[in-house]
Image (cartoon, rainbow, N blue to C red):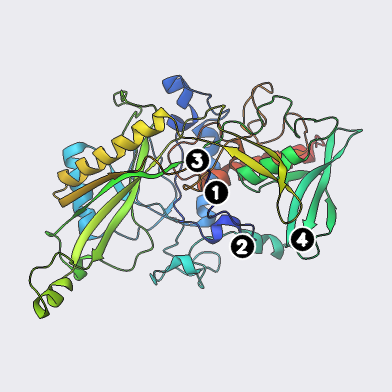
């Protein structure tokens, strides 16, 4: 099956320049999933290990949200919530009362009060066009900008990293080789520590392209695990929509809010029953919208007036966990190079029986929720032929673990094989969970940097 290459940017700021900003913590149901259901490997850390770093990241980034007290989706340090529409409030209350499931405001990296020179969101709407007030978080205007202000950071744009350079005598990384995007000339930068943060596919491509006589199967790959266990979320594989004529029209819709709702995972929960059809679980993202009433009665002038009578709808799309499988993997294509002369990845990935069973359940449970909420004209959907990569949440392929024979990185995202080499993105995820990964990527990076500073002070790297 093809792997869709969309939404993956080689720019300063990376995907945070165009991301959906949904920011959710993982729980120990995710970090210790293998202990819960027997599949795969646990993460080599717990929620307690990462919680302080989630706090730091949320305070710096700014996340709007509602505290719910649900184990499967830990609460965080939130800005005031943006609020729910009438239809969403009705949906939330009835789903909770009738099914016991929790629908909450999406936890989004859009601030609702000023912080660090960034203005509160003013609800203009088109976040995908950029944010002139920097009310939504992206790395270019916050993290990178703050680093440059210290005077201790050098930013080299238009640099396509090819491989990690090694000191063979000391078995340590000494820098990277990159291709200048404009001149196509190779250049080198050197450093005491090398940290790859290019996201799973690109970071692992760099490691595989860094193979040498001491590391013939790719750098940091003595385990043979590098490149294996690729995962990407089931993206809107199943869901449903329905209409809420019992809610008001425009006055009930609220501001042009850059957020939606999130239904917290309710299958295979900590204290709930084991679901017979599949392992792990999924959540829903969605929200209400105003639509033209295209089913209006009448003809001519009467129909024109009827079309303009607002129709309130609410839609849900499922985001599901993808199980880690050895046969979902990447390798260097021996016959293809990109425009910079760098060998590209050949990607092998399919969704398995577990993912397809989850898609079926997404459609059924979404319709069940909408019916419980009193929606009319409920329309479920499920898409089984959507290729991997659509989620743009690829994780894994350089997994973390305590055993160097079964993993690439240690719990601090440090290579088992090369002690001054770190990979601080989603490459190390042993499992994907069903929540968006970005908040966890950032929290892991801060934790790893905290560890790295200590190791540098002690002279260990």
Residue on which disc 2 sits: 140
10 Å crowding of disc 3: few (<14), some (14-19), many (20+): many
Residue on which disc 4 sits: 154
N-terminal of the pair, mark 1 or mark 3, is 1
Disc number for residue 56: 1
N-terminal of the pair, mark 2 or mark 3, is 2
Give the residue drawn at x 15%, y 52%.
377
Residue 18 on image: x %, y %: 52, 60
Tag 4, which secondary structure?
loop
Residue 416 on image: x %, y %: 72, 29
Does residue 182 lie above or below 107 as drawn? Answer: below
N-terminal of the pair, mark 4 or mark 3, is 4
Residue on which disc 3 sits: 232
Does residue 117 lie above or below 38 as drawn? Answer: below
Give the residue drawn at x 40%, y 28%.
353
Disc number for residue 120: none
N-terminal of the pair, mark 1 or mark 2, is 1
């Amino acid at each position: 099956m093809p792997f869709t290459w969309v939404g993956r940017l080689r720019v300063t700021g990376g995907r945070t320049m165009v991301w959906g900003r949904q920011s959710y913590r993982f729980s120990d149901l995710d970090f210790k999933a293998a202990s819960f259901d027997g599949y795969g490997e646990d993460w080599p850390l717990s929620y307690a290990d990462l919680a302080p770093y989630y706090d730091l990241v949320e305070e710096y980034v700014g996340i709007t949200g509602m505290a719910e007290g649900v184990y499967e989706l830990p609460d965080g340090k939130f800005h005031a919530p943006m609020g729910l529409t009438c239809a969403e409030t009705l949906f939330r209350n009835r789903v909770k009362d009738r099914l016991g499931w929790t629908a909450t405001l999406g936890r989004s990296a859009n601030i609702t009060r000023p912080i660090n020179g960034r203005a509160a969101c003013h609800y203009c709407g088109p976040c995908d066009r950029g944010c002139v007030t920097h009310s939504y978080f992206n790395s270019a205007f916050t993290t990178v900008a703050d680093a440059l202000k210290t005077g201790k950071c050098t930013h080299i744009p238009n640099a396509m990293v090819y491989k990690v350079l090694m000191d063979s005598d000391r078995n340590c990384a000494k820098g990277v080789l990159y291709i200048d995007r404009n001149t196509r000339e190779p250049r080198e930068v050197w450093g005491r520590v090398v940290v790859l943060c290019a996201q799973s596919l690109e970071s692992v491509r760099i490691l595989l392209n860094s193979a040498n006589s001491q590391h013939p199967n790719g750098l940091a790959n003595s385990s043979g695990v590098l490149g294996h266990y690729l995962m990407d979320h089931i993206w809107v594989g199943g869901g449903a929509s329905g209409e809420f004529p019992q809610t008001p029209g425009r006055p009930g819709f609220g501001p042009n809010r850059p957020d939606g709702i999130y239904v917290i995972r309710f299958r295979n929960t900590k204290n709930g029953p084991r679901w017979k059809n599949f392992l792990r679980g999924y959540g829903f993202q969605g929200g209400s919208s105003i639509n033209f009433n295209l089913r209006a009665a009448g003809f001519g002038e009467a129909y024109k007036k009827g079309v303009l009578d607002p129709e309130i709808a609410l839609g849900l799309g499922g985001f599901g966990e993808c199980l880690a499988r050895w046969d979902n993997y990447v390798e260097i294509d021996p016959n293809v190079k990109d425009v910079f002369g760098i060998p590209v990845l050949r990607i092998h990935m399919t969704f398995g029986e577990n993912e397809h069973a989850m898609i079926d359940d997404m459609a059924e449970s979404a319709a069940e929720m909408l019916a419980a909420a009193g929606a009319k004209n409920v329309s479920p959907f499920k898409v089984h032929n959507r290729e991997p990569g659509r989620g743009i949440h690829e994780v894994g392929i350089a997994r973390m673990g305590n055993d160097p024979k079964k993993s690439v990185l240690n719990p601090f995202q440090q290579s088992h094989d090369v002690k001054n080499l770190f990979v601080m993105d989603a490459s190390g995820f042993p499992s994907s969970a069903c929540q968006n990964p970005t908040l966890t990527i950032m929290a892991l990076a801060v934790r790893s940097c905290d560890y790295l500073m200590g190791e540098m002070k002690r002279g260990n790297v």
